[in-house]
Image (cartoon, rainbow, N blue to C red):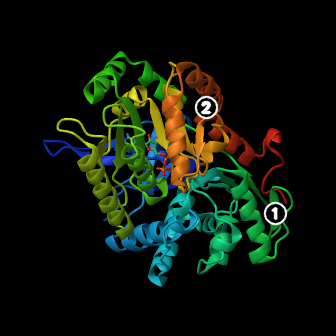
Amino acid sequence: MNKSYELVVVANRLPVDEVVDDKGKRSWARSPGGLVSALQPIVRRQGGAWVGWTGQPGEAPEPFDTDGMHLHPVGLSEDDVDRYYEGQSNATIWPLFHDAVEQPTHRRPWRQAYEAVNRRFAEAAAALAAPDATVWVHDYQLMLVPAMLRELRPDLKIGFFLHIPFPPVELFMQLPRRAELLRGLLGADLVGFQRPLAAQNFLQLTARLLALEPDEDRVEVDGRTVIARAFPISIDVAEVQDLANDPEVQAEARRLRTELGGGDRRLLLGVDRLDYTKGIEQRLEAYGELLAEGVVSNDDVVLVQVATPSRMRVLEYQQLRARVEREVGRINGEFGAVGQVPVHYLFQSMGRADLVALYLAADVMVVTPLRDGMNLVAKEYVAARHDDRGTLVLSEFAGAAAELETAFQVNPHDVEDLKRGLVDALEADEAEQAKRMQPMRMQVHDNDIDKWARDFLDALAGDPEHGETPGAR
Ligand code: GDG
């Protein structure tokens, strides 16, 4: 008989990528991205299973064990990738759930593929879970899985966590087959969100769309109780701190500072997946205007923008890349000098150590998404700054803004406000930097990823600290 698991995580991606070395040898390496940074340590510790896609189209490789985890690949054909992943997930749901900052596209074949792939994930999880096991389903690609799984395995405790914002009722109502999607989520015992407002949006929707009667943080459906609550996600603080304390990483941070400006130029840093929700264009616009107005100059500031390649087969992402690169070229052409430019743009994925070296080198970390579920980069920056130096410019529209209250908060839709935030952050003296950094460091330190996962899993298990047993009749 096949082995079964007490904890099964179900997410679009497995926590590894296949890498091929110079000699053609294949192996698995941890993949970048918020969800993976968040979950891998927990599954590893519990010796659980993880159901997900490898990131490559084609037949799924055989299940395998790595790093104390059982990984169960789900296969996606080229068509599935086009329709379920790039289509329904990333060109319909993603923009709609981020305030429609890009126009969502609606296509019937995408919805059909989404349903078929969700069923495949649900079936894989149903086959792996031990009797009465806990299954934790993640994110917007798999919103139908909880209901499908409940039908297959009514014995399971099912949790769902949404990593991105949940839209207001009016926006959600635009989705074709909206009730089906909502019923998919209601298959869970516990539905977790980044912010309390998202949980409220969800509960209101159950009243509007299904005529249910939500009460505080719960709603009765088919004789079960579904709880909806906020669990703001965090980071593996120890991982970031270990890197920040590593003498080699610190030496790299010093080298970067010398190389970028002889120690005199102040370093602004942006680190984002290249995504239209991250506000990279607005950030460049504000920076360009500050240079044009002479408020800052190429001699006293430099911006390093890391833009990690993401979803590059989706048209909107290709167009965004072209616009961002044109703007970087324009700013450097207009305000740069031979051997010294105001923007260093890196369209590449970096190693964790290099990323932390950049955090340590930066005077101003610029995190200005138009809308973001949480934003882990902001928390990583804070965790890295054991010297209490550096400032954080943070969008009000990132979930992290609720916790990192002493950041320089800005409205990224308002270029003037963005400029004000950048200038204030650049002008903050050491005492002010420390005064703002210390409470943020305490916040992140006391609420790291372990606590987030424990809180969620305890609430799902019905720990009295976290309210009544979800799912109790
Ligand atoms: C989604 C939600 C939510 C980035 N570039 C590189 C790299 N990264 C790492 C960062 C950070 C993660 O990826 C990005 O996480 P974010 O939270 O900033 O953003 P999303 O990818 O959009 O994540 C978001 C998150 O899920 C978790 O719930 O916070 O709101 O949108 O850890 O450090 N890592 C490496 N190289 C890079 O170039 N190694």
Q: Secondary structure at mark 1?
A: strand
Indicate the quadrant where residue 408 lies. top right
For the residues carrying marks 1 and 2, which lies nearer the camera in this image?
2
The residue singled out by tag 1 in the image is: 219
Q: Is mark 1 within 8 Å of ligand 1?
A: no
Give the residue at x 54% y 35%.
Answer: 424
Residue 6 seen by the camera: no
Q: Position of residue 386 (x, y in %)?
A: 51, 20
Q: Nearer the viewer, residue 317 or 109?
A: 317
Q: Of the residues shown, which amino acid type is indicated by label 2?
A: Val
Which element type, helix, strand or loop, lies under badge 2? helix
Q: Which mark is residue 371?
A: none
Residue 444's disc is: 2
Q: Position of residue 70 (x, y in %)?
A: 46, 45
User: Callout 2: 10 Å neighbours few (<14), some, many (20+)?
Assistant: many
Q: Is residue 396 above or below residue 444?
A: below
Query: Total label count?
Result: 2
Viewer-side residue, 183 vs 66: 183
* Callouts 1 and 2 close, C-beta under 8 Å: no
Is residue 139 something one can see in this rendering? yes
What residue sits 63% from the left and 40% below the top?
Answer: 453
Q: Which residue lies most toward the left here? A: 23
* Residue at 26 percent of width and 40 percent of height: 341
In three-dimensional space, the C-alpha distance between marks 1 and 2, rounded to whole angstroms, equals: 31 Å
Q: Residue furthest bottom?
A: 108
How many other residues sit within 10 Å of disc 1, few (<14), some (14-19) or many (≥20)?
many
Residue 127 vertical placement versus 88 (above, below): above
Q: Quadrant of the C terminus?
A: bottom right
Residue 314 image offset from top left, x and y in percent: 36, 67
Q: Is residue 84 left or right of residue 471?
A: left
Q: Amino acid at mark 1?
A: Val
Residue 366: % across, % down: 47, 41
